Structure formats: C-alpha cells, structure tokens
Amino acid sequence: MKKRFAEISDADGRKDMVFEITPDLADTFIAAIRNAVDVEGPRHAHTFDDLAATIAQTSHLIQHLEVFRELAMVAADRTSPHADRKAIAIAAGIPPSRLYRLLEKHGQPRNRKTDTER
C-alpha cells in the first residue's frame, strides 16, 4: 500500500509536512475537514496488514483529537466566568453532564454560582 503525505501551509507561507499517512485515513481526514456527510469504508487497504495499519493510525489520531477537544473545552470554559457551557457542550457533541464531569476533572467548578474562589 502506497502511503501519502500531507502539507499544511499558513498565510505566511510556512509549511508543515506529515509523511506515511495511510491512504484511507488521508481520504477520511480530508472528507471530515470538508464536512462531507457520507463516511466510506476503506478503499485502498485490502490485506490484513494494511487494514491493521490503517486502524492503528486512525486510533492514534482519534485519541489525540479527543485529548485536544477536551483541552479546548476547558480552555473555552476558562475564557470567562460567564462562558456558555451549553454552547461548549453542543459544539463538542456531548451531553452537558459529561461536560461538567470533564470540567471538574480539570479543576473547573461544576456550579459557578456557588464558587467564590474565582
């Protein structure tokens, strides 16, 4: 299976490159960034080893993105004592109860009305 690479540039012309991306993950990542509605199964990987490599790379990406999303939610909540937690939960696609547990895990108060230390 021939691997792909990605090049991401910023407005100042700086580039960052990533090599050795499985083609199915590359296709799926592009579709996700473009908000494509349909999700397709693997089209390039056919052997067990190729499919296992795609699964492993996809799992690592998912784990990394989940941690990043969690830290972004905490950062959004810390922007203001009046940050809209309902909007944060909606943006994250999680129920408010899960957001409150996550925020508590990172030292944010569950109920800001009773928090006097902020």
Image (tube, grey):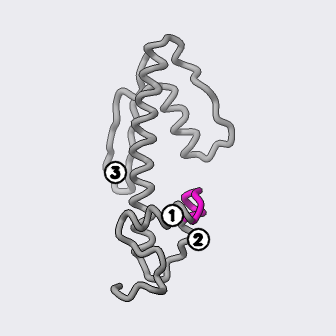
45 up-or-down from 93: above or below: above
| Identity of the residue drawn at 32% across and 45% down | 15
Which residue sits furthest top? 47
Q: CA distance from mark 1 to mark 3?
A: 37 Å
Q: Is residue 93 magenta?
A: yes
Q: Label 1, on which residue? A: 99
Crowd tier of the residue under label 2, counting other residues whose Cα lies within 10 Å: few below 14, some 14–19, many 20 or above: few
Amino acid type at image mark 1: Leu
Q: Label 2, on which residue? A: 86
Q: Is residue 95 magenta?
A: yes
Quarter of the view holding residue 57: top left
Q: Quadrant of the C terminus?
A: bottom left
| Identity of the residue drawn at 39% across and 56% down | 11
Q: CA distance from mark 2 to mark 3?
A: 37 Å
Nearer the observer, 75 or 2: 75
Q: Which one is earlier in the sequence, the residue at label 1 or at label 3?
A: 3
Amino acid type at image mark 2: Lys
Crowd tier of the residue under label 3, counting other residues whose Cα lies within 10 Å: few below 14, some 14–19, many 20 or above: few
* Position of residue 37 measured from the top left corner of the image (x, y, whole percent): 68, 42
Quarter of the view holding residue 102: bottom left
Which residue sits furthest bottom? 116
* Position of residue 74 measured from the top left corner of the image (x, y, whole percent): 41, 66
Q: What range is drawn magenta here?
A: 89-96
The disc placed on residue 13 is 3
